Image: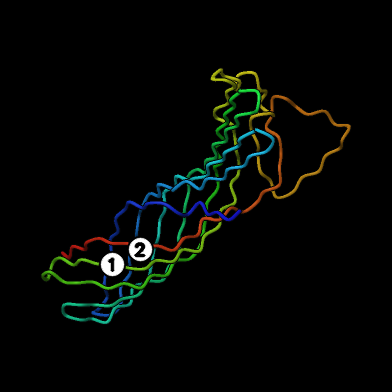
Amino acid sequence: FRYSYGKGFNVGASVGYFFNDFVGVDLGLNYLIGGKTTYKFNSDGDNYTMDLYSRMFRINPTLVLKTGGDTWEPYAKFGVIFSTGSLLSENSLSDSNGNDFFAKTKTSGGLATGFTASLGLAYSINENIQLFGELNLESVTYAPEKAGITELTANGQDQLSALSVSEKEITFVEEYSMLWSTPVDPDSPSLELQSYEPLSSFGVNIGARFFF
């Protein structure tokens, strides 16, 4: 199924500097409260639900190009974005025997990188305040470094404490080799190949600018 950890609600602020009436730079800082993507599956009386979402802190330096209008001012922004935080997965299963299972996994580590582009329109209330709205495109991928089960229950009873480190923690690597005859170290995280997760999005930003 299709999903992206980049969807959700952004809260943030930015500071900028204009070299002249047409060209400037901007540094945005924001926090992504990721919206949930839900996948549901039913088979032979077993009901499975998976929710995927993110919590990410992002830094977004951009180049700003504007027309220099007096009241209405179209503009464009192009830049790069750096993100760090967590990808979260909540999995629940209600089986045909009336048992309920729940697991929550947190994936983190590393830095997500990508590109951003925006087209916007600003309205000047006075020389110090502007209101703006913009369409924003972000193309971002994320290769986490580690994952771990943070919650595991069966019929409301904790099961996480019964797992070894290798059963509840994963370290993602670019490559590794192993022999089937080599025993698994229960006190070390298991190894898995690193993969890329989507953090891209297309959305609308609205806000206010203050000039000093």
Q: Residue at x 57, y 20 (%)?
A: 155
**Residue highlighted by disc 1:** 133
Q: Which mark is residue 203?
A: none
Relative to 147, say whether 72 is above or below: below
Identify residue type, mark 1. Answer: Gly
- On-image quarter of the C terminus: bottom left
Q: Is residue 16 left or right of residue 130?
A: right
- Image location of residue 28, percent across then percent down: 34, 59
For the point 56% across and 40% down, the residue is 50
Q: Give 95 or 67, whichever is nearer the viewer.
A: 95
Element carrying mark 1: strand
Number of marks in the rendered image: 2
Q: Would you place residue 187 above or below residue 82 in this image?
A: above
Q: CB under 8 Å between callouts 2 and 1?
A: yes
Q: Is residue 128 above or below residue 195?
A: below
C-alpha span from label 2 to label 1:
7 Å
Position of 124 with respect to 58 (left or right) is: left
- Residue 101, given in percent of the width and then of the height, sits at 59, 27
Label 2 sits on residue: 204
Residue at image location 51% in from the left, 55% down from the top: 199
User: Quick one: which residue is furthest to the right in this view?
Assistant: 181
Dot 2: element: strand
Q: Is residue 106 left or right of residue 81?
A: right
